[in-house]
Amino acid sequence: MIKTLNKASEILKSLKVMKFLTFLFLKFLLLSNFVMSETIPTKYKILKESSACIKDSQTQVCKELVSEIEKLQLVVFDQNRFKCQSSLLGMQSAIIEAYFLKNFSNERISFMIPYVIKNC
């Protein structure tokens, strides 16, 4: 009888531990998505920041825009929207050239904007 009670007590303890761990796991899973998720930039935001980058290609806006376009082009790739992805990659490469090659003309960024508008 004492053995049975000890086993029952051990089972209850292990169930409590499993319940607690399950609770922690679910809490982490549900809450971490909100905390760790990255926002995907909108087409409007990218076009607005591209215009700011055209005005001055050496700003921090251009540098941040490259990573924002990267996020968006990965999303459209997953959606099989390859024309949009190609347009975003073209704009991204133009911004990289404008940012790192100081004497590069920003005409290429301006050239890519209609393609992003049309294909995305």
Image (cartoon, rainbow, N blue to C red):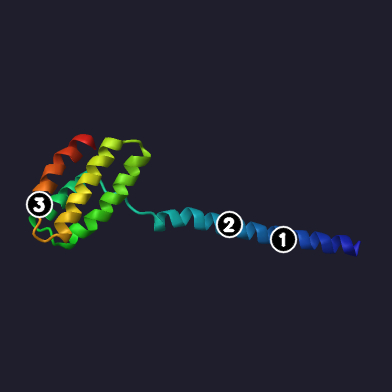
Q: Residue at x 27, y 55 (%)?
A: 67
Q: Is residue 7 above or below residue 69?
A: below
- Name the residue carrying label 3: 106
Alpha-carbon neighbours of circle 2 within 10 Å: few (<14), some, or many (≥20)?
few
- Viewed as shown, does residue 120 lie left or right of 75? left
Residue farthest right in this picture: 1
Label 2 and label 1: CA atoms lie apart by 14 Å
- Looking at the picture, tell me which residue is in the foreground, 84 or 14: 84
Q: Residue at x 19, y 47 (%)?
A: 91
Name the element at disc 2: helix
- Name the residue carrying label 2: 23
- Looking at the picture, tell me which residue is in the foreground, 38 or 64: 64
Q: Is residue 118 above or below residue 51?
A: above
Query: Which percent across, then down, holds residue 12?
Result: 74, 59
Mark nearer the N terminus (3 vs 1): 1
Name the element at disc 3: loop
Label 3 and label 1: CA atoms lie apart by 65 Å
Q: Quadrant of the N terminus?
A: bottom right
Give the image quarter of residue 79: top left
Name the element at disc 1: helix
- Looking at the picture, tell me which residue is in the foreground, 42 or 22: 42
Label 2 and label 3: CA atoms lie apart by 53 Å
Query: Which percent across, then down, holds residue 87?
Result: 22, 41
Alpha-carbon neighbours of circle 3 within 10 Å: few (<14), some, or many (≥20)?
many
Front: mark 2 or 3: 3
Q: Residue at x 79, y 62 (%)?
A: 9
Query: Which percent across, then down, holds residue 102?
Result: 11, 61
**What is the three-letter code of the residue carrying label 1?**
Ser
Mark nearer the N terminus (2 vs 1): 1
- Name the residue carrying label 1: 14
Alpha-carbon neighbours of circle 1 within 10 Å: few (<14), some, or many (≥20)?
few
Mark nearer the N terminus (2 vs 3): 2
